[in-house]
Image: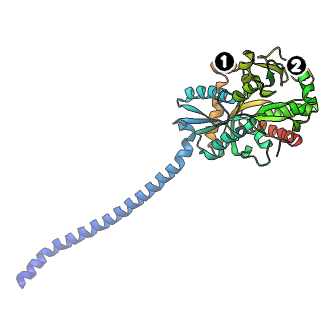
Amino acid sequence: MKTLNKKTFRLLPLTLALLFLASGCGANSTAESGAGGAAQTGGATAAASAAAAGPASSAGTDYPNRPIEYVVPFSAGGGVDLVARTVAEGLSKEWGQPIEIVNKPGAGGATGAQYALKQAANDGYTVLADNVASTTMLQAGSASAPVLLSDHEFAARVVTDAPVFVVAADAPWKDFREFSEWAKANPEKLTWTSVGPAGFSTFAVAEWLKAIGADFSKTRMIATKGASESLPLVAGGNAVLAVHTVNETSTLVKAGKLKVLAVLSPERSPYYPDVPTTAEQGVKDLSVSWWTGMSFPKGTPQEIVKKWADGVAKLAQDPDFVAKLKQLQVDPNVLTGQEFTDFVNKEAEYYTGLATETGIRK
């Protein structure tokens, strides 16, 4: 028993030391575990915050990092399509990413506009090749338009162009004055082409007929998907009149298939210098004009919208880009930012009044 007690006393210091070390290690382990957990929690929170902030902060700097879909709401070969392809080529070279043209014609531009503005994501990778027909005229022409100005983030207007009144090359009228007199006397015989009841040509025809005192309601529209379908109908005698742009009509005019009766602009077109304006031929106060540009779905990051606006403004200073537009017989007439938005709003107000007065608006 005494031997056992001596051994116990000899082992006691060692036992106490081991207990102390174990206690200390346990405390340190607990503290380190708690600190490590806090560090992991803080790191996870920071990572989550960074992930949440990442796309917004990098939207402008990283864009574009993959192909972009550029939606044209009209058929290939028309003015909107050709200008969009020219812009796409220029910005694709500038940004190093493909910009792919996708034609989605139908419903006077509404089909493509709905797809680009209401069905696609607002991440900047779907762009609408906007046009007067798919914006201001679309909203003005219907009390229940499927796409409104409020659905757009307007980026830039690229070009404007003058409407021209064309008939078949062998049509009997020698000029616009004579044609206007015939239309006033025979509105029921006047057929004209348009992409829809609220299309660009519809507004041009309605404004003209109002100015000469003809009955718009007695005339007849022939619906088409755009100039590439419309103009051959007129050239072939299947419609009396088409109103399209200088750019869109030039090929068939040069080929001797169409006759230009008048240009709707304050001055004669440099591309049709021998064709008098509507005002020169006695029909004054016509103001319908054509333009094309681009817009995005609401909520698209402003850095991306601005990148397109700045890109277009830069292209307009590039001699090669301007030369390519001149080959299409159009010239750059750029508006960006708030100026473009103000222009669109003012235009919509005028067209709504015209549509209401002439019966276009339903």
Residue at 52%, 51% in the rendered image = 52
Query: Which residue is labeled 2 in the image?
Result: 175
What is the x, y in percent for residue 5?
10, 82
Q: Amino acid at mark 2?
A: Asp
Query: Which residue is labeled 1 in the image?
Result: 323
What is the x, y in percent for residue 89?
59, 26
From the viewer's perspective, is residue 27 above or below residue 162?
Answer: below
What is the x, y in percent for residue 2?
6, 84
Quick one: label 2, few (<14), some, or many (20+) residues within 10 Å?
some
**Quadrant location of residue 82?**
top right
Q: Nearer the viewer, residue 50 or 4?
A: 50
Q: Secondary structure at mark 2?
A: loop
From the viewer's perspective, is residue 103 above or below residue 282?
Answer: below
- Image check: 201 left or right of 91? right
**Quadrant location of residue 149?**
top right
Q: Closer to the camera: disc 1 or disc 2?
A: 2
Please give the count of numbered marks on the rendered protein.
2
Q: Report if residue 283 is visible in the image.
A: no
Q: Amino acid at mark 1?
A: Ala
Q: Nearer the viewer, residue 278 or 107?
A: 107
- Image check: 215 left or right of 64? right
Q: Earlier in the sequence, mark 1 or mark 2?
A: 2
- Image check: 285 left or right of 245? right
In which quadrant will I find the N terminus?
bottom left
Residue at 58%, 43% in the rendered image = 123
